[in-house]
Amino acid sequence: MRILGLDFGSKTVGVAVTDPLGLTAQGVEIIRRDSPNKLRRTLARIEELVNDYQIEKIVLGYPVMLSGSEGERVKKTKEFAALLEKRVGKEIIFQDERLTTVEACEIMNQAGIKKEDRKKYVDQIAAAIILEDYLHSLK
């Protein structure tokens, strides 16, 4: 069973997918948009990925604050999740994403990726971390 992992941001969505056995997560791409409220193409691209990879469910990063409280980003993420679920008809599971961007930056630092190049990869790596965290929570 393949699972799609998403790191939803104001102008990007990082995408990761599990291997066919659902054991590991790999970054796939970053979907970019010009405006935070323009989601039509983003949703269409995710639908394509769901079909291409034969996705069974979606894990979406849940952006609670470090304190555990919910802010505006949580509201936007829930709205996005409702639109996505309606569009693709797959179960959506929220996964705490606290510090995933920090972890992604550490991974890129260890890999020797230059600071000016990190924006090209950070959301995709964060999506893979969110998906890996979900897979670990199943064990």
Image (cartoon, helix red, strand yellow):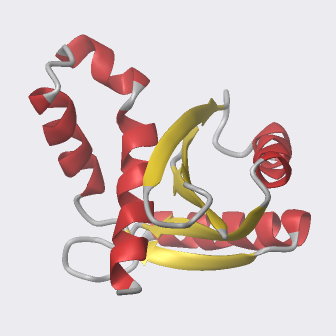
> Toward the viewer: 135 or 23?
23
Residue 136 vs residue 56: left or right?
Answer: left
Check the picture and name the quadrant holding the N terminus.
bottom right
Residue 6 vs residue 95: left or right?
Answer: right
Could you tell me residue 83's position as x and y percent? 80, 66
- The relative height of residue 127 versus residue 98 in the rendered view (above or below) is above
Check the picture and name the quadrant holding the C terminus.
bottom left
Could you tell me residue 17's position as x and y percent? 57, 52
Query: Which quadrant of the view contains residue 42?
Result: top right
- The relative height of residue 39 versus residue 108 in the rendered view (above or below) is below
Query: Which quadrant of the view contains residue 19?
Result: bottom right
Could you tell me residue 10's position as x and y percent? 54, 45
Residue positioned most to the front: 21
Could you tell me residue 22's position as x and y percent? 54, 67
Residue at the location (21% across, 30% down)? 108
Residue 38 vs residue 102: left or right?
Answer: right
Residue at the location (28% across, 48% down)? 101
Residue at the location (62% across, 73% down)? 78
Query: Which quadrant of the view contains residue 135?
Result: bottom left
- The relative height of residue 61 versus residue 7 in the rendered view (above or below) is below
Residue positioned most to the bottom: 139
Residue at the location (13% across, 40% down)? 106
Q: How many marks?
A: 0
